[in-house]
Image (cartoon, rainbow, N blue to C red):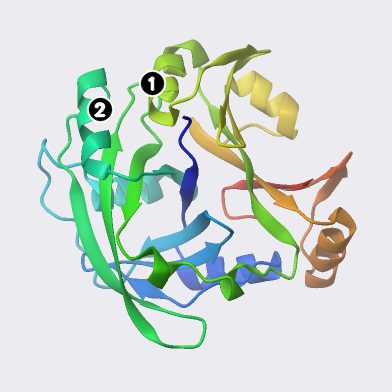
């Protein structure tokens, strides 16, 4: 079965400004959290998936690199050294160790499993423990995007129906667009990572991962689809399904957020959304 999107890692230089932006976009943004290595984040939850707004904290220090360990913190620091935006794609896992072995056997992994825990905060302010196991993959065709799967060990402490109600009517992640000079070079990697068959589309390839459409297209195709060139290769655009486009448009207008309205969608440019093209589409 195709893997489902677990979350998207959205990196920014100024995490406070990023959280404020996403609130203006009409999302409910969770409390600030901190990882032991110094990155800090806010979570925007949907039913079964989330956005991880992330930045480097004042005490950030990238761990020493090792070929056996994927450099999660180092990757984020390097990404922010180039640009802000959609840095990593994360799929859901029921068994991170089994996925790690599968990635290694398929020739797209070879990294150690990464386990960590942190304190989380429920919408009512109660502090709880959350813990995760991660298995990483990598593609030379998409070096500017991070890829891993995530197994949650205390999902009951993480997910919250109250946190999934958004003023803009957002329901979940409907689609993702990656940019690659030669999408065919990424075809096999994405098919294995997403556990979904590839479909040839004009200018690239597409996959359906448990209801989320993932496209990998050329820079020229991306520019034609989104009306502007991508900031670089890799993950470039995020599509969010909403209950009612008029409600979303009203929310954006009231917040003073500029957007382009096309048939059945509202597009917020990367220049406004801190490096990530965000398209709200009718569910």
Q: Is residue 200 above or below residue 215?
A: above
Q: Position of residue 74 (x, y in %)?
A: 25, 49
Say above or below: 261 vs 145: below
Decide if residue 187 is in sight here: yes
Q: CA distance from mark 2 to mark 1?
A: 12 Å
- Residue indicated by mark 1: 189
Q: Quadrant of residue 211?
A: top right
Q: Is residue 109 visible?
A: no
Res 157 → quadrant: bottom left
* Disc sitting over residue 102 in the figure: 2
- Residue 127, percent from left and from top: 36, 84
- Image position of 264 (left or right of 158): right
The answer to which of 261 and 195 lies nearer the viewer is 195
Q: Residue at x 84, y 71 (%)?
A: 254
Is 183 on the left or on the right of 256, as rendered?
left
Residue 197: x and y, percent? Answer: 51, 18
- Dot 1: element: helix
Which residue is at a point 26% across and 28% down the rendered structure image? 103
Residue at (22% x, 61% y) in the render:
116
Along the line of sight, which residue is nearer the eye, 15 or 251?
251
Camera-side mark, 2 or 1: 2
């Amino acid at each position: 079965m195709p893997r489902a999107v677990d979350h998207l890692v959205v990196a920014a230089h100024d995490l406070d400004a990023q959280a404020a932006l996403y609130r203006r976009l009409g999302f409910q943004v969770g409390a600030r959290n901190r990882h032991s290595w110094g990155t800090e984040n806010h979570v925007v939850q949907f039913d079964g998936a989330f956005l991880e707004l992330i930045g480097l904290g004042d005490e950030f220090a990238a761990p020493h690199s090792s070929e056996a360990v994927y450099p999660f913190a180092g990757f984020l620091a390097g990404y922010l050294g180039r640009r802000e935006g959609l840095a990593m794609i994360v799929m859901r896992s029921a068994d991170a160790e089994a996925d790690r072995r599968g990635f290694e056997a398929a020739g797209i992994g070879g990294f150690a499993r990464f386990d960590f825990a942190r304190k989380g905060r429920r919408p009512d302010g109660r502090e709880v423990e959350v813990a995760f196991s991660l298995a990483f993959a990598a593609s030379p065709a998409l070096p500017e995007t991070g890829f891993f799967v995530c197994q949650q060990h205390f999902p009951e402490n993480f997910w919250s129906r109250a946190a999934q109600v958004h003023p803009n009517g957002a329901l979940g992640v409907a689609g993702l667009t990656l940019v690659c000079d030669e999408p065919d070079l990424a075809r096999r990697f994405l098919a294995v990572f997403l556990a979904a068959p590839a479909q040839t589309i004009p200018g690239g390839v597409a996959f359906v991962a448990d209801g989320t459409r993932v496209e990998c297209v050329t820079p020229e195709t991306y520019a034609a689809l989104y009306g502007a060139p991508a900031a670089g290769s890799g993950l470039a655009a995020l599509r969010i399904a909403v209950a009612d486009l008029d409600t979303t448009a009203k929310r954006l207008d009231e917040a003073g957020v500029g957007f382009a309205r096309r048939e059945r969608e509202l597009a917020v440019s990367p220049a406004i959304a801190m490096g990530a093209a965000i398209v709200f589409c009718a569910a």
